[in-house]
Image: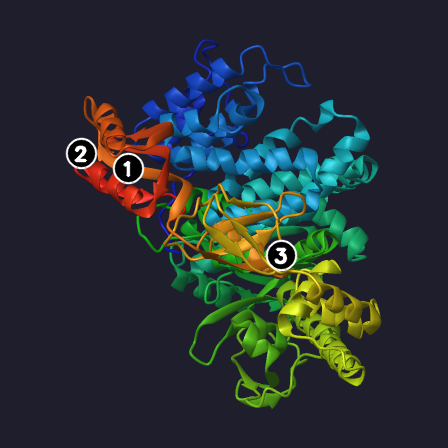
Amino acid sequence: MKKLPIKSLPPSKALGAEISQDPFDLLAPVLKSFSFHHPKDEVGPIEEAWKVAKEKHEGQFRASGEPYISHPLGVAQILADLGSDRQVVMAGLLHDTVEDTDYSLEECRRQFGETASLVEGVTKLSLISKELSNAETIRKLILAMQQDVRVGVVKLADRLYNARTWRFMPPKKAAKKAGETLDIYVPLADRLGMGIVKSELEELSFKYLDPKIYKKVVEMVGARAGVRDEYLEKMMGEVKASLKSYGIKAKITGRLKSYFSIYRKIVLLKKNFDRIYDFVGIRVVVDSPQNCYRALGIIHEKWLPVPGRFKDYIAMPKSNLYQALHTTILGDGGQEIEIQIRTEEMHKEDEYGIAAHWKYKEKEDFGSPEWVGRMANWVKDLQDPSEILPALKSDLTSEEISIFTPKGETIFLPEGACPLDFAYAVHTEIGNRAVGAKINGIPSSLSSKLKSGDCVEILTSQSGSSGPSYEWLSFVITPKAKNKIKRFLSQEKNLEAAQKGKKALMAYMLDRGIPFSLPSLVHASSALGFSTLQQLYYAVGNGKISCFAVSRAVFRSKASGEGSESEKYSVTVKGVEKGERIELARCCKPVPGDQIAGFITNFRGVRIHSTRCPDFVRLSEENPGKIVDAQWKGEKGEFEAEIEVLALDRQALLVDLSLAISNACVDLSSSRQKVAANLVSAYFSFKFRDFPQLELVIKSLEQVEGVIGVKRVGG
């Protein structure tokens, strides 16, 4: 993804915190912030979106007692402050209109075009969260972000505004929302590089998830503030002086770690709070990447670096484009102090992330970040909803490492990943056929732990005899690898059971001299409630149904099915009871000349479909045992067709089309039209007696002035 220059936020205490000085112009701060980031862009469409949102939410109020419009306005202001594009800011204003008012998505699409797709993405998520599990909400969010990552940006702004109002909720409900935010939305903001959003969500979640511990941490930090600040000022002065002596101009700032970060170190990492200096850091901002490395060398020359605590995110940026040098030194008095070294551009990148940089539609190859697609792929495959949240939480919160393919391509994996995780990240088949690996050219096992910067080559088996084993599940850590291994093992187990069942059934039938054929087995499996023959074999192999029961069903299927005919439609159907009711399917309305087949319904006889009909294709895959042969026995009968006519819009067009149909001497049943720009799509349903008469209708319509094309619907 291309990195582009970012401007700083206009002065404000926090995202979306500026209040309009004019009570009659509440949108002013949004327009001011948007114009600051996009001085050449028009604000008219934003004003139009504001008018619609204000009108539609009129009379609605939030739990806090505020007018409801305060929420979309606040979300839009957060998005504008982040530097988001015009469509995203408009989506912030409109994101609740489709869900909570009588404003339809179609109206939104007509009025605001591209913005409607973002509104639709966020609306679907809101509707799901009310009706289904949180896991399904998150699944839909990731899939929506795969189509347009800006949906995630709007959702995060929405969550941030709502988090600021948790004080109006019952404590238990607020704590539940906070836990969900900390597990999913905080790491999501981190992956999108939206550091400023991540930090505030983190603090608010901690505050409402465990208010007592939050208060205690605040008190402890406040009690040591004087000592901490004095030490930090001294160290900052020494760092600045050291860099200045080498001619490096730098902006030095101190930063106190967030209360949540301190809490994690005290409680989760079991650090001693007395080591308060570990809770502060120094940020060094210089003018170029070259001076970042020079500054690092100067600092390491003066102070001893702590082993294992250096990370170079400039040479190998994180997947969210984060760049900086991280080091921890033993400062004066032997106290640990963290130092980040970056350029001004890198600093702004960390604060605002993808919301400010993503330039949509400028290039055709611009899409969602690689990690969104990777996550969407395994989220799609997970069948058990209970696995989604733990896997997603693990994927989002793990520290990432950069691994290289032999061709130099970068694959991002969670810390602790092994070559087998890498193999599945490259391609499922490579993972399934993996037998070994080389790490930096040295032969290694598939379970070896990888570290950032490793170059990995996967050795695969060409025989096809090897494959995943249950042991692999004990050392892979990525959700994709685990899911693909489980699926392979499940398929192998099912295949073995099906093969065992097939052999047992064949042997049973042959031993007893019971005549059978493939069609009779298909009919028997359908009669026994199985949608495929493979499922029948699997059930026999697992002992869920006996060979005797199957043989009886085969015998019954051979004793019936003499066939049936329909004089009305000139159709012959094989494999059903004589006199069975036969009707033409209304989804495709087949006519003589179409390839056809029958589908045995539960209560309405046999429906005749065109074999190209999408509904028939689906039915044949789901219930192959209910498909029977059908043939035309003549070209005359009672048939119905629907014709689609595409034409240029003009006066009296529909009158001329109707006349063309009536001139062909057919009975018109119904008609409907759709108009887009200057094109008309007209649909006519009518009855006819044979195929030549249908051809006459089509030819007559093709002669009408302005007609571009004529085709039969479903044919």
Question: What's the residue type where badge 3 is placed?
Answer: Val
Mark 1 touching mark 2, by CB under 8 A? yes
Q: Position of residue 255 (x, y in %)?
A: 60, 46
* CA distance for labels 1 and 3: 38 Å
Mark 3 touching mark 2, by CB under 8 A? no
* CA distance for labels 3 and 2: 45 Å
Mark 1 touching mark 3, by CB under 8 A? no
Q: Position of residue 456 (x, y in %)?
A: 54, 80
Q: Position of residue 2 (x, y in %)?
A: 36, 55
Question: What's the residue type where badge 1 is placed?
Answer: Val
Pick whichever, 711 or 162, lies toward us. Answer: 711
Question: What's the residue type where badge 2 is placed?
Answer: Val
Q: Is residue 440 above or below residue 482?
A: below
Q: Is residue 380 above or below residue 200?
A: below
In what element is the residue under mark 3?
Answer: loop
In what element is the residue under mark 2?
Answer: loop
Residue to which mark 2 is pinned: 704
Q: Hey, which quadrant is residue 304 in on the image?
A: bottom right
